[in-house]
Image: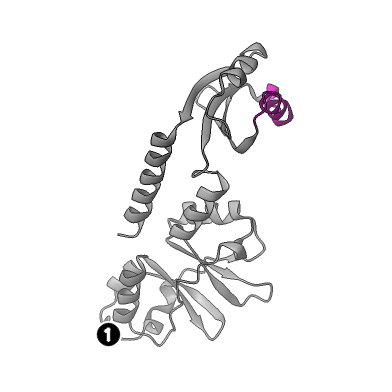
């Protein structure tokens, strides 16, 4: 998935001749703390609520504080990993997207990217979650896939992260609730099973409720 596929239609840009008061009103309305400032389709920068709160006269246009605008953006053909990194590193609620000509194409909101990611990691799909611990030199996604598929199951999503021991934690979302056979096969191959979760209807509903609660929190 690339950046332009994450653009949210719900976040409008603000114009340089709009007032600070109006910018704050829009931020409150759309539950964000940043807004892209655009003149026509020319991206001027990103204004934050703190920039506006520091204005001596918020009733004046935000063009009076252009020196505080941050030139943070992402090109539309960049991978969504790049978008996540920028959002995380710069603590953004909105990330402007520019096209190949350097013109403003839209923005990515934190809410929108979380919703997209929940689909990508199959949050709402029934099944099980299995966490393996693997030494870096032994990691083989093809072997892991073969083990799962050899037990008449398939991987819906996979995530790999380093742990404190210097090994890899491999989190698998599997499309079956009963995965004892999968676990036993992994153990025969010497994999460490850190934890597993069988997602029954109750657990699935709990996951949905937790995700909905997160989204509601982000919209406060």
Residue 109 pos. (x, y %) = 46, 63
Q: In screen coordinates, is 155 left or right of 93?
A: right
Residue 42: quadrant of the picture: bottom right
Q: Nearer the viewer, residue 214 or 42?
A: 214
Q: Nearer the viewer, residue 68 or 72?
A: 72
Q: Residue at x 67, y 63 (%)?
A: 77
Q: Residue at x 52, y 31 (%)?
A: 128
Secondary structure of the residue carrying tag 1 is: loop
Residue 5: quadrant of the picture: bottom right
Q: Quadrant of the C terminus?
A: bottom left
Query: In this figure, which residue is indicated by the disc labeled 1?
Result: 59
Asked if residue 203 lies in the magenta stretch, the reply is no
Say if 104 sits above or below 167 in the image: below
Asked if residue 138 lies in the magenta stretch, the reply is yes
Residue 69: quadrant of the picture: bottom left
Residues rendered magenta in the picture: 137-153
Magenta-drawn stretch, dominant element (helix, strand or loop): helix
Say if 139 sits above or below 33 in the image: above
Q: Quadrant of the N terminus?
A: bottom right
Q: Residue at x 26, y 79 (%)?
A: 56
Residue 75 pos. (x, y %) = 63, 66
Q: In screen coordinates, is 40 left or right of 47?
A: right
Residue 176 pos. (x, y %) = 57, 31
């Amino acid at each position: 998935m690339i950046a332009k596929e994450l653009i949210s239609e719900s976040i409008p840009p603000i114009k340089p001749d709009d007032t600070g008061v109006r910018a704050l009103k829009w931020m409150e309305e759309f539950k964000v703390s940043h807004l892209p400032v655009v003149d026509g389709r020319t991206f001027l920068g990103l204004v934050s609520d703190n920039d506006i709160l520091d204005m001596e006269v918020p009733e004046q246009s935000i063009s009076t504080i252009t020196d505080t605008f941050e030139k943070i953006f992402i090109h539309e053909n960049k991978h969504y990993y790049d978008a996540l990194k920028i959002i995380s590193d710069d603590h953004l609620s909105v990330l402007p997207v520019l096209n190949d000509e350097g013109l403003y194409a839209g923005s990515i909101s934190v809410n929108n990217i979380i919703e997209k990611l929940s689909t990508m990691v199959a949050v709402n799909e029934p099944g099980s979650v299995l966490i393996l611990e693997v030494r870096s030199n032994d990691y083989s996604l093809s072997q892991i896939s073969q083990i799962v598929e050899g037990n008449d199951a398939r991987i819906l999503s996979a995530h790999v992260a380093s742990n404190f021991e210097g090994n890899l934690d491999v989190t698998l979302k599997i499309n079956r609730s009963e995965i004892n056979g999968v676990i036993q096969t992994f153990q025969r191959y010497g994999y460490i099973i850190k934890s597993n979760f069988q997602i029954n209807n109750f657990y699935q509903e709990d996951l949905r409720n937790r995700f909905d609660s997160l989204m509601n929190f982000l919209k406060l």
